[in-house]
Image (cartoon, rainbow, N blue to C red):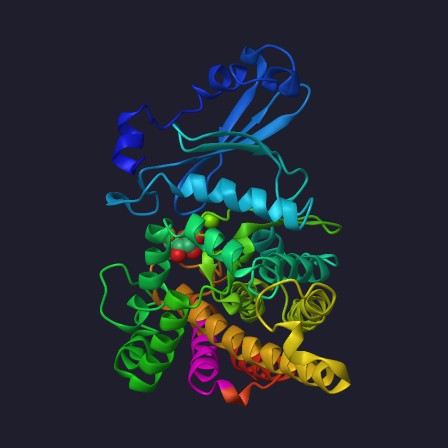
Amino acid sequence: MDDAQRVAAGYRPLSEADLPRYLAGLPGMADRLGGPPAGWTVREVGDGNLNLVFIVKGPAGGVAVKQALPYVRLVGESWPLPLSRAHYEQMALAEQARLVPGRTPAIRHYDERLALIVMELLEPHVIMRRGMIAGTRYPAFAAEIADFMARTLYFTSDLALTAAAKKDRVGAFAGNHALCKITEDLIFTDPYRVAANNRWTSPELDDIAAAFREDLDLHVAVSRLKLKFLSAAEAMLHGDLHTGSIMVTEAETRVIDPEFAFYGPMGFDIGAVIANLLLNYLSQPGHETEPGGRRAYQRWVLDTVGEVWSRFRDDFLALWRANPTGDAYPPDLFQGMAGAARLEEERQAFMDRLWRDTVGFAAAKMIRRILGLAHNLDLESIPDRRLKAAAETAALGMARTMMVETERFPSVDAILARAEAAGASVRA
Ligand code: SR1
Ligand code: MG
């Protein structure tokens, strides 16, 4: 069924007033919420760029309801977007739940006709981006996000799957190309050209935005990343793994919103996490209420970047050693002690290559949030314009080096050192 047919077949966006009657008609939902539907509270809380999100609560419990709109909410009806993204989102949620139980919200109901998913209400979790802007530490985060990425990326790759199974999975997500196109345009193209949707802190960043539009070294580097995004179906990605797609308590991490899921390059997801941590790190001086008041928090953020990568690397390698079930690297070709040693060397080389991809994709993610359409609250909510522009300038300088001179960052420590230098320039 294509999207026009979906709309024709009875799609309509629900309102707060519609929700109680709709939910009361779903099996088991009235018991889950408790009491009569008239007593349920409904709030539309969507603060993302694309969808409606409702929180519905009754005396016995609550649910979150996410409904796709047939257009980009951030821009309006002039930018149509397929409702089929809800189908890919629920498929990705189911796959992630199978691979990493308990790390995503449980699906209570999926309604294809309405492009709507009823999910477990995550309480008392908050959107991680908001918590980090407030300066809250999340001690469980690094280990849990590293485990999530290692398991979802490893077990959907050719290292774990047979070629037939992998190709079936790639095919199952191939129709999500409209969401991929958003990424292809907004991350890998628009920030480097004149585009109607671009915006930046002007006039402070006018010169750097113009320089990025003329910088052919940067254009080559981002085009190589774009080609990898277009062509490297390495594993099932979340596809939009920023800190707005993660809900946290100090004890637990949950990953939400995989509507951009498809089979792509692994470094894209890891780079998204690292980019958003780095942008938050650079934004912190702008959120201080006393000079230096966020220095200790900044240290935690950088330690977290280091821990995310090192734990991911260890987890992924451990999964590979324990589950060599895929068609890549046939065991027959690596027999005996010499074969085992050579395969282990190759695993290390694989991780080094993945790290380079991660650095490049992280850079692309940082640049798009400053020069492109969709910015992030870490920087946008800085009240002092001078500090905001200083943080953005530092982030752009760092990201350009990461993308064009990736070899200068052979380890995560090199990224942390560069971030510290960039952070010092924000305070200068
Ligand atoms: C038009 S959509 C803009 C952005 O919002 C989503 O969260 C993705 O990051 C997308 O690129
Ligand atoms: Mg989202």
Residue 91 in picture, x, y percent from top left: 51, 42
**Residue at the (27%, 77%) spot, across then down:** 213
In this picture, is 187 found above or below 93? below
Question: Which quadrant holds residue 393?
Answer: bottom left
Residue at 53%, 79% in the rendered image: 356
Camera-side residue of 322 and 178: 322
Relative to 214, 117 lies left or right: right
Q: Is residue 334 above or below residue 158?
A: below
Can see residue 246?
yes
Residue placed furthest toward the front: 332
Question: Residue 333: x percent and y percent?
Answer: 63, 79
**Image spot of residue 114 (x, y percent):** 39, 28
Q: Which residues are magenta?
A: 391-406
Lateral position of residue 180 relative to residue 151, left or right: left
Which residue is nearer to you in this view: 36 or 334?
A: 334
Figure check: 79 above or below 241: above
Main SS of the magenta part reads: helix
Find residue 349 and report its image quarter. Answer: bottom right
Q: Quadrant of the N terminus?
A: top left
Pick the front one: 309 or 176: 176
- Residue in front for this viewpoint, 78 or 396: 78
Q: Position of residue 240 (x, y in %)?
A: 48, 56
21 inside magenta stretch:
no
For the point 36% across and 72% down, which residue is it? Answer: 227
Q: Is residue 310 above or below residue 137?
A: below
* Count of picture labels: 0
Q: Is residue 238 visible?
A: no
In the image: residue 254, left or right of residue 200 = right
